Every structure is written in structure tokens, then in C-alpha cells.
Amino acid sequence: MADALSLPALHDGPLAELRVALLEAGYADAFLGECEAIAPRMLDAIRLPAVHWWLRRDPRPAALIARLWAYGDVVDDGALARVFDAGLRSSLQRVGALREASGGFRGGLRLVPFCGLWIASDEMHGEDPVMGPGATTQLLAGAIGPGAGRVLDVGSGAGSLALVAAARGASEVVGVDLHPRAAAWARINAALNQLELELHTGDLTAPVRGRRFDLVVAQPPFVVKPAEVASTTYLHGGAMGDELTMRLIAELPGVLAPTGQARILFDSPWRADAPLWRRVRAAHADAELQQLIFVSPGNSPELQAIGYAANSHPSLGPEYAQTVLRYRAHLHAQGIERSEQALAVLRRGGRSEERRVGKEYRLTC
């Protein structure tokens, strides 16, 4: 049986049977919402034991799937047999999606419902993983209306937003990501959801230079990168955190159609000498590009350091403590004592402005 997950084998293997099993189990957005309502806003390392307890007592087949592929629990063979037939179990083991563990089996990937779809991706605590949908991805998904035309998803990861656009009838959907495994995951998810995508590996908009899009969506990596911390493709955006975002904004005039728009979700350091709207305008330097920026207060440096460190060290051991100190010292050295969460909407024509809104955005798929 396989141990390491084989993406080619998964793509060519049990996806059709897995799709049927997920449908029959009722593994959908509403169920995941119940799980996420347990001790919300807490670090996963702290809340997961309570989530496991709740799921182990839930008899629904969706609970077993969530234990395996959303919350990292071990499931015994008897329970597994009630959800997956022997052939599918064998296929999932062969490709590494199920792995033998003490007391049963654990998942070898992450698989979650998202906006009526299923998105599979790497487990998030591995080395440089490809990311599926996160807590804020729904905000950008809400910006994708029916029949959105030509859509470009920059930093597409496992294809979450690109697949939402395809499912909602976009005429053309292109995903671009720097991580070489991202396109492989997005192809798997396209096959799992019976959708079609065009996928490229490359830096920001370079792979689609010369083409124009009606909608560009992106949630670029925006976490600060201390010198002592290993780089993670989906996470780190530069020493200040927003360097990659500003590079993307600079490239938008070259990919937006005459009536196109972009929606970019990111965090950025607060700077008294340079308001965010001014830095965004300077980045694209296009007088015809209208910008509307929704800004709310970001997390404190302490919460940023804790969250970023826990992301890579979920056991909260000595390495976690050292990484918190590295992030906090780096934020201090960069002069970052406040940050802002921003949704930038950019389109051609009109005048630019900055608008501040409340702490939370709430949009549903």
C-alpha cells in the first residue's frame, strides 16, 4: 500500500467513486459549518480535541469523512467500511489518500466542501503545502457572480475560486500559481467536480501576458517573512508582507479587459506616512483604474506571531515558541505595530477612494 500521496494516481484513480461516496454521505457546506461552529476563532491545536469528540459521537457518514480529511482524526476499519466499499477503500489506500495508523486509518490529504463543491489539497502542516479554501476565501467567492465571463484566479492553489467561477458559468476560467503542485491539485478538483479549468504554473500574471480578463480574483500570500523562518509559497509575501500583493496590483492594467475588474484580498502594514489607498494607486500607476478599498483593523503583532507560528508548528512545542519570538521580533524590526485587512476592488474609469468598514466581512456562497 502507498504511504506518500500520489497525485497522478489519485487523478487517474478513484475520483468518480469518491464523488458518489461524498454525495451519498451528505458531506456538504452545511455540515462543515456545524463543525466550524465548535470553539470558533481558536487555534486548531487547541480546539481539535473538542471537534474530534463531537464528530466521534455523530453517526452521520459525513462525520467520519470530516474526521479523516478535515480534522486529522484516526478512524477504525469497521467505521470506514460503513462509508466506503472495499474497492474504494483499497483504491484510496493505494494512492495514499488513506494511511494505516495505530487504531485504524488517517487521511493523507485535506478534503472539504466549499460553495457546493469539494476541494482537495495538501495537509496544511506539511512542507510547503498547496492550500485549499481558507476562512476568508468565501469573501472572494461571493464576488464571483453567475456568468462572470473570462476569469483569472492568481495564486489559485488547489483551484478553489477558479472552480467556483467555472461552476457559476464563467465562459473561460484560468488559474495561475507559482507552486508546481498547485496545477496538479486543481486538475484533481476539476475532475472530482466535473468541471474544466485552464491551469498554468508561473509568477503572478506572467503565464497569461497579453490576454485580457473580465474578472481577476486573488488572495496573495501576505504574511511577513522573517529571515530565520523557512519560506512557504502560499503564506509569505515578503519582509513587510504585502510586497507580492503590490507586484500583482502593478500587473493588473496588463490583464484587465476594458470593462474588467479585480478583487484582491490581503493584509498590509499600517503606515501613517503612506495610506494604503495611496500605495495601491502608486503600485498600478494607471489613471484610468478606479479603486475602492475596504479596510478594517488587522490582528495585533502578538496575534499575528502566534497565528503564523501555530500554522507551521501545530503541536505548540518548543519550535512553536521559538517561531513566535522570531515573528514578533521581525514585526518589531520592520516597524509593524498595526496592520490592516483590505479588500481592494479595482476597475477602469472614475475616481479612486478609500472606504473603511467594520471588522468583519460576511458573505455566503
Image: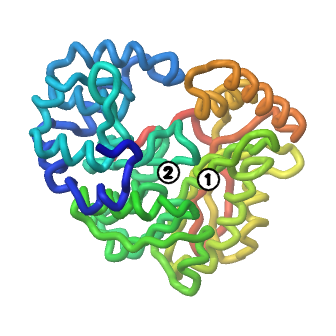
The reply to whether the C-beta atoms of the residues labelled 1 and 2 are less than 8 Å apart is: yes
In this view, 11 is above or below 20: below
Residue 355, visible in the rendered structure? no
Question: Residue at (29%, 29%) from the top-left corner?
Answer: 105
The kind of secondary structure element at disc 2 is loop
Q: Is residue 337 above or below residue 176?
A: above
Compute the Cα span from label 1 to label 2.
8 Å
Question: At label 2, which amino acid type do we have?
Answer: Val
Q: Tag 1: Cα neighbours inside 10 Å, few (<14), some, or many (≥20)? A: some
**Residue 205 found in image quarter:** bottom right
- The residue at which mark 2 appears reads as 130
Q: Pinpoint residue 185: horizontal percent, then vertical percent.
A: 40, 57
Judge whether residue 186 can be spotted in this image: yes
Disc count in the image?
A: 2
Location of residue 39 in the rendering, given as x and y in whole percent from the top left corner:
43, 17
Q: Position of residue 49 (x, y in %)?
A: 41, 14
Label 2 packing within 10 angstroms: few (<14), some (14-19), many (20+): many
Horizontal side, residue 173 vs residue 222: left or right: left
Q: Quick check: 46 left or right of 286?
A: left
The image quadrant where one finds the N terminus is top left
- What residue is at 35 percent from the left and 48 percent from the top? 120
Residue 292 in percent (x, y) is at 61, 58
In the displayed structure image, the side of residue 42 where residue 91 appears, left or right: left
Residue lying at the far front of the rendered structure: 1
> Which of the two discs, 1 and 2, labels the residue nearer the N terminus?
2
Indicate the quadrant where residue 243 lies. bottom right
Determine which of the numbered discs, if any, sits on residue 233 in the image.
1
Q: Residue at x 37, y 22 (%)?
A: 37
What amino acid does circle 1 point to? Answer: Thr
Residue that sits furthest to the bottom in the current view? 210
Q: Which residue does the image show at 61% across and 28% down from the upper left?
A: 313
